[in-house]
Amino acid sequence: MKKNLIMAAAVLALFGTQTAFAAEATTVSLFDDKILVNGKEITEDETDAVYLDYKTETHSDVPEELADLQNRVITITDAGTYVFSGTATDAQIAVAAEDSDNVRVVLNGVDITCRTAAAIQIYSATDPRTEGEYGVTIEIAEGSENVVNGSHTKKTETDNVKHDAAISSNVSLGFEGTGDLTVNGDIEGIEAKYGHLTFNGGNIVINSHDDPINASEDGIAVVSINDGYIFSSVTSDPQYEGDGLDSNGFIKINGGTAINLAHPYSMDSGIDSDGGSYINGGVVVGAGNMYDPIENDSEQLYMLLQFSESTDDLLVVTDENDKPVFAYDFPYSYTYIAFSTPELEEGIYHVYMGGEIEGVEKDGLYTEITSYTGGTQLHHGGAMTNDRGFGGPQMGGQRPEGQEGKRHEGFDGQMPADFEERMREEFEKRGEEMPADFMEKMERGEMPEMPANMQPCGGMGGGREFQSSSDVVTEKFRLSKDSKTFSNVSSVVNNSEFTDVARSAWYYNAVTSAAAQGIMVGATETTFAPSATMTRGEALEAMYALAGKPAAGEASFADIDANASYYAAAAWAEKNGILSDIAEDKLAADTKVTREELVQMLYNYLGDEYEGAVPDFRDLNKISAENAFAWAVKEGVISGKQETVRPLDYVTKAEAATMLTNTNK
């Protein structure tokens, strides 16, 4: 019987038939208190095509309360089609078939949870090791909804392989079908350790703490996406990291929809491969904070945008006539965003941020767009800011409150906790010793010496240097086969390389952030004047920009002109009580602002009647606005310097930029 099934499988595989073994399908029904195979209680007889085993996965990552937990393992040992349905906790579906066996696992309304190991574990089956082919198929049945919650294991006696994903396979694996599948992994989501990983169908959502999709530990296999819908996202928890789609071999996206979001606070890419990533068709989104190139000879055009300031806003790309061709609303801040659609053609495009859009939205991606208005037009080009291959000047956006870990100077994100260990391993692979000052230079913001045959960021996803897309700043994104990457994408000209703002300056991040967001402007197009003091009019303009420049009305101050640049800001401030305890009948716009006055203005805008004690600074007796200062210290808007807060000193533009961006986190 088994030999006949193998022959049938071989014949059907030649014709790509998806209904193999339909007449011989085995049904497996999952329950928390029993498992039924073809309607009968499963046996523990290892000679059966599918039998019940028990396994305790205990290692250092297993919580103490689960250390002695025994999983029920539904083990498939023979070729065939196995249709699973039902709900089970602390259970695992395992495939341990012979090397000549084709196995099809059909998920037809499955909700399975394994808290100490992979929920679907494939040890062995036939493996053609030909790109796009696979011996094990996971079919997602039409109209079904399925959930797979899995964990990970250390190396085991079974196969001496560390399994990191909720669905883990030692052989080439393929996904087919039209149903829905959600995969949640406490490290990775879906992994093919050594063979190819192919997606030919299904509506698949993958959430994980590391790479949602990972493949090819042998460095030669291919992740292929040919059809279906895939949304892969890494958690925003700052203690983790990960690429959206990762392969140590190759990635080829030929069709379907693939949205891949990396960890928002780590140096990872949306789409990352060591061998090469190709986009040949489909709708593709990749977002991360490190540059990993897409191959230039991809069959379908794509755009890769490097932002001067990481963004989590709605991104809309229109053609030269401002017809939207792509729109995505990002859930987290990213520095590098790549996308591709069949609609992209060579020509000029415009890029917008924010605004109002109408269309069909799914997981942030907009299709069937009927209208778009009100966005801020962006430009690209100018002096290149990202010359280290790691990410933009504010990699990963604002760092979450309480986030710990090492940070790269110039980045407002987290260096992965195991960064030093990983880099040391990369040096050792190349027969070299990591320089003693490597980490010290990294933390100072300097690019340390790398091995000669190692790209910048090699070993952290394969990031490479990103070249400036234009010597001049332009709103025209001219897309062609030879021009697909655009640097310094921003709404503000010269926001990142003011000649008087050194990268080593303590205020560098704040100044570039304030300028990029349009909260503050430079003294000229090339200078910021960080030591210059702020006037009341300038401070109001900055706060008005911070508020988004809402409708302001008219101002009643006796000493301002309706044509003054700060008029709308003054009217808004008056309407919203921003100047309470500071100005009444006259604005005195040219008056220099003290640190205490700016703190009071920010408190009037955001403080919400906070009452608290000011820390015991040495100049505490000089503070009049005690509630405002107590609020500002608590919220991290200001910090003391040498145990003082200098309330009566005039605020400099650098200090104002720091306070405003701290407020805007």
Image (cartoon, rainbow, N blue to C red):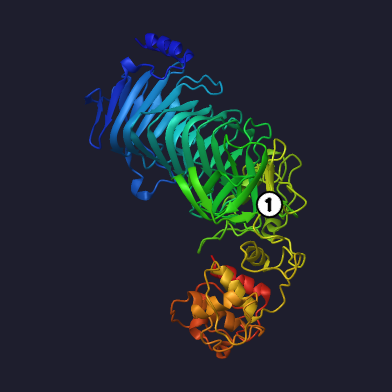
* Amino acid tagged 1: Glu
**Residue drawn at (53%, 73%) of the image:** 552
Q: Residue 617: where, in percent of width, then height?
A: 56, 84
- Look at the image and tell me in which quarter the N terminus lies: top left
Q: Nearer the viewer, residue 582 or 291?
A: 582
State the residue lying farthest toward the bottom. 621
The total of numbered circles placed on residues is: 1
Q: In the figure, residue 395 lies in which quadrant?
A: bottom right
**Residue drawn at (44%, 24%) of the image:** 136
Quickly name the residue at label 1.
475
- Look at the image and tell me in which quarter the C terminus lies: bottom right
Count neighbours of disc 1 (C-alpha within 10 A) and say few if under 14, some if 14 to 19, many if 20 or more.
some
Q: Residue 293: where, in percent of width, then height?
A: 66, 40
Instruction: Determine whether 430 is above or below 653 in the image.
Output: above
468 horizontally vs 28: left or right = right
**Residue drawn at (42%, 9%) of the image:** 7
